[in-house]
Image (cartoon, rainbow, N blue to C red):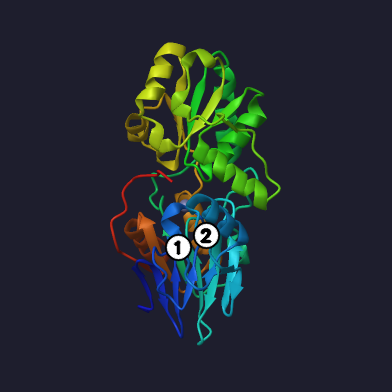
Amino acid sequence: MSRRVTHRDGIHFDLDRHVVADARSATGDVNLVSHAHADHTFGSSPDVVVCSAETAAIATARTGVEFAFVESAPGIELLPAGHVVGSSAAIIEGADGTRYCYTGDFSTRDRAYLDGFDPDAVEADVLVMETTYGHPRYRFPPQDELEAAIREWIREHDDRPLFLFGYSLGRAQKLQRLVASATDRRVLVSRTIAEVNAAIEATTDVSFAGEPLDGRSLSDLDPDDLSDEIVVVPSNQSRREWIDAIAAETGALKAGFSGWAVEDSFLYRGDYDVTFALTDHCDFDELIETVRTIDPDVVHTHHGFDEAFADVLATEYGYTARPLKRDQTSLADFR
Ligand SMILES: [Zn+2]
C-alpha cells in the first residue's frame, strides 16, 4: 500500500509536490485549509493557502491573521464538505494521474444553510477521510426528527431562560437558526459567537438572530434581567459557575448538542439537563455510504475511530483500508 499519505502535523501527500492539509505550520509546497476551526488555521501567513473565500474570511475574523489564499491550484480542486460555512474537501491529482480525495471534517446532511458533502460528485482512487464517529455506536436520528425534537423542547420550556451550548463556529449558528424557526424569544450570544456570526454574514447571505450584550460579556448577566431568553454559549462554558448561579435563581435549563450525545457520559461531563445528537459530522452509516459511493481503491482514515472504521471497511466491505495513526484523539468535541 502506498505510503505517500501520512499523518504528521496535518495530512501530508508526498506526490510530485508536497501537499499538506490542515497543519499547524505550513511546510508544504501547497498548504490546504479545509475549514476555519482553530486547529486548522495558521498563526502567521504562509505564501499560498488553498481554501475557500469563506474559510479565509472566518479564519481572519477569529485569529486576526490576514493571509493570501487561492480557491484552487494546479491539480487541486475544492468541493463543499458540508461541515461548517466554507468547509471544503479536496481532490488532489498526482503527476501519475492518481486522484486523491481528502476530507477534513465533513457531513453529508443538508442542514440549515449548508449543503451536505456530495460523494456522487467525487471520482477518486484514494480516499483520505475523517472518521470521528466511525463506530457503529454512532448512528444519529434523521435531521428533521432531531430538529423537531429540539424545537419541541424549546417550546415546552417557554417560561424560563434556556442555555444552548455549541462551539462558536458551526453549532452556535445552527442553534440560532433552529431557535428562530421555533420561537420569537430573544436570543443572546457570547461575543465570540457574535464575531463568527458577523464574519459569516459578511461573506454569505445567511444571517443570525443572536445579539451580543452591549459591551458586556455573558458572565455579567444578571438573573433579574432574564425571563425567557435563549442564550447560545460556547460548549466549553457549560460547567461555569455563573451559569449555575443563574440556573439556581431562574430555573434555567442547559442543553448540550453533539454526536457524543448518544453516550450518557456526554450529559454528565457537560452537566447538561438534556442533550441532542446534533452534529456537523457524518455518523457511522453516512461514513460507510460515502466510501461505497466513491468506491476508491484505497481508503485512509484519520481522527476518531480511525482504526475501528478501517477494520470494518477491510473485513466487511473488502476495501484496502489503513488508519493514518498519529496522536490519539480524545473523545472531546469542543470546537
Ligand atoms: Zn471542524
Q: Nearer the viewer, residue 245 or 83?
A: 245
Asked if disc 1 and disc 2 are in contact, CB closer than 8 Å, the reply is: yes
- Cα distance in 3D space between marks 1 and 2: 10 Å
Give the position of the N terminus as an image quadrant: bottom left
Q: Residues within 10 Å of mark 2 (few under 14, many from 20)?
A: many
Q: Amino acid at mark 1?
A: Met
Which residue corresponds to mark 2? Answer: 290
Single out the mark in the foreground, 1 or 2.
1
In the structure shown, which secondary structural element does the residue marked by tag 1 occupy?
A: strand
Task: Give the label on residue 43, or none.
Answer: none
Q: Amino acid at mark 2?
A: Thr
Residue visible at 45% across and 37% down in the picture: 234
* Viewer can see residue 70: yes
Q: Residues within 10 Å of mark 1 (few under 14, many from 20)?
A: many
Q: Residue 32 at x, y = what percent?
A: 49, 68
Q: Residue 197 at x, y = what percent?
A: 59, 42
Which residue corresponds to mark 1? Answer: 129
